[in-house]
Image (spheres, grey):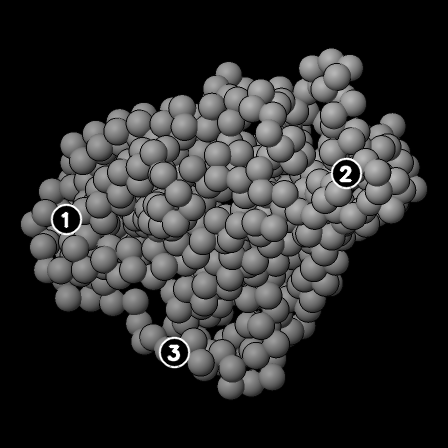
Amino acid sequence: MKFNDIFEYLGDFGTYQKRIYFLLCWPAVFTAMQMMVAVFTLNIPNHRCALPGVSNDTYAVQGPDHELLLNATIPWKTEKGVSVRDSCLIYKDDVSGGQNRTTQECSAWVYDNSVFKNTVITELNMVCADKGLRSLANSILMAGLLCGSLVLGIISDIIGRKPALMVSILLHIGTGVGTAFAPNFVAFVILRFFNGASNIGLFIPSFVIVMELVGPAKRTLGGMIIQSFWAVGLFIVGALAYFIRDWHHLQLAISVPAVVLLGLYWLVPESPRWLLSRGREQEAETILRKAAEVNGVTLPQKLFDKDTLDDGPQAKITEMFTSPVLLVRTLIIFFNWLVVSMVFYGLGLNVGNLGGDIHLNFTIANIVETASYVMCLFLLARLGRKFLHCGSMLVGGIACIATIFPVLYGGKELEWVTITLSMIGKFGASAAFAIIYIFAAELFPTVVRNSGMGGSSFSARIGGILSPYIADLGTIVDGDFGNALPLLVFGAMTVAAGILALWLPETLNRKLPETIDDAKVFGKSSNKSYELDHSVKKSTTKKGV
C-alpha cells in the first residue's frame, strides 16, 4: 500500500501521534524566544552625549549645576513638538559663540537605564553613526535562517530527521549561551548567525517528523496548532524580559533551559517515511506497529512493498514558468511569501520603536498574534484560504498605512491610536503567515509541491533579511514622518500583496492539481465543481481511524 494508506488503519491523529506532536511543538517555543528577544536585547534607550571630563555623568539630571552644564554643552532639538536634548551632537565651541555655536558628533554617551540596566546597544555604543549596526545584526540573524534552511534541510535528508534535530539543539544551546558572553560586535553577529541557523534547524526537522506521522486529513490542523507554541515562546520571553533587565542574564535565561530539548532523543522516534527511503524497513515497521498498539488498532501483516513511497512522477519548479497563468501565479505566491515574512518579523521588531511601555506593547502584540491563529483555526475551513488570506493582508496593510495620520497630525495624546493600528497590522500579518503555508502548498501541483514550497521558503527568508532595515527606518529618517515610515512601507507592501493574491484561485473544497496541466486549468469555471469525497473515505476507512 501507499504510505498515506497506512493512516487508514493507524488513524490520522491517534494517541501516539498526539504525544509525539506535543513533544515536537516545544522546539518552536525556544525558536520564538531567540528570534524575538532582540526586541529587548537590541533596544535603543534614550541617550545623549556624555559631558567631557565628567566621570559621574548620568542621563538623569542630578541637580541645578548638572543642568546648567548640560545646557552649555548639549544642543536642543524638537521631537513630536517637544524640546529634547540632542542624542548625538555636542557643542564644539564654548558658550561665547552665542546663538551661532557649531556642533559636532560625540564619541561617548550616557544612557537612560530606567527601563533596562543595559542592552547590547549600550555596551557596544551602537548609536548615532553606528545605529545601522542594529539593523545589520538582526538581518544577519535572518540570513542564518536562510543558510540553515538550505544546509540543515539537506542534512536532514541525508542523516535523518532526528539526528538533524539533535545537531540543531546542540548548536542552539551553544550559540545561545555564547551570545551572552560576546565581547564585541563581530563575535555577537557571528553567534547570532549560527543561532538563526539552529532556529530553523529546530523547526524544520520537528515539523517534518510531525507531518510524516500525522495522516493527510489532520495535517492542516497540525500545521496550524504548532503556530500557537511559537506564541507561547513570545509570552515567555516577554515575561522574562520584564523581570530581567540585564541583557546578558536575559540571553542566558532563554538559552540554558533549551537543554531539556535533548530529552527528545529518547522520547521521539525517527520518521518512518525517512527510514523507508533509506531501506530500513524493519525499523520503520517497528515504529508504526508501536503507534498502532498505543492507538489501539491493528495494522495489516504486510505494510510495505516497492511502491509504498512512490509518489508518482516529479517535475522541476521551472515548469511552473512555462505558461503565463502558472508564471503569474507562482510569482504572486513568492511575492506574498516575501511580504508576509517581512511584515511579520518587521512588525514584531518594530514593537520597540512604538511609543509607550515596551513590555506592554510586546504583550499586546503577542495576544493579537495568538488571536489571529485562533481565528484561522476556526474560519479557514469555513471562509476559505483566499478570502481569509486576502482579507487579513488588506485589513492589516490599510491599518499600517493609516498610522501616518495620528503620527503626523497628533501628539503623544494620540499615541494609543498608532499602537492600536499597528496591532491590527500585526493581527493581519500573523494570520496571513499562518494561512500562506497551507494556501501555497495547495496551489502548487503535486509534481512540484516540494520544490515550490522550497522556493516559497527562500522568498520568505529574503523578506526576513529585509525586515530589520525597514523596521529601523525611523532611526535613520528624522522627524515624525520617520516614525511613521516603517509602518507605511509595511502597509503599502501588504496591500499590494493582498491585491495581487486576489488573482489566486480558491483551494477549499476543490480537487487540488496533481500535474502541470491540472495547474493550468485549476481555478477556471470548469474546474470549480468538486464533489467532496467524505463518503468515499468513510467507506474505505478501517476500524480505529
> Residue at 78% across / 23% down in the picture?
68
Q: Quadrant of residue 480?
A: top right
> Residue at 39% across / 69% down in the picture?
451
Q: Secondary structure at mark 1?
A: helix
On screen, residue 210 versus residue 336, left or right, reads left
Count neighbours of disc 1 (C-alpha within 10 A) and say few if under 14, some if 14 to 19, many if 20 or more.
Answer: many
User: Badge 1 is on which residue?
Assistant: 284
Amino acid type shown at disc 1: Ala
**Who comes first in sequence, dot 1 or dot 3?**
1
Please state which of residues 460 and 276 is positioned toward the viewer in this rendering. Answer: 460
Q: Is residue 498 visible?
A: no
On screen, residue 377 versus residue 293, left or right, reads right
Q: Pinpoint residue 542: horizontal percent, then vertical percent.
A: 30, 44
**Who comes first in sequence, dot 1 or dot 2?**
2
Q: Is residue 308 visible?
A: yes
For the N terminus, the image quarter is bottom left
**Who comes first in sequence, dot 3 or dot 2?**
2
User: Badge 2 is on which residue?
Assistant: 94
**Most extreme residue toward the bottom, as rendered?**
322
> Residue at 39% across / 49% down in the picture?
186
Q: Pinpoint residue 125: horizontal percent, then vertical percent.
A: 53, 40
The number of callouts visible is 3
Count neighbours of disc 3 (C-alpha within 10 A) and say few if under 14, some if 14 to 19, many if 20 or more.
Answer: few
Please state which of residues 259 and 217 is positioned toward the viewer in this rendering. Answer: 259
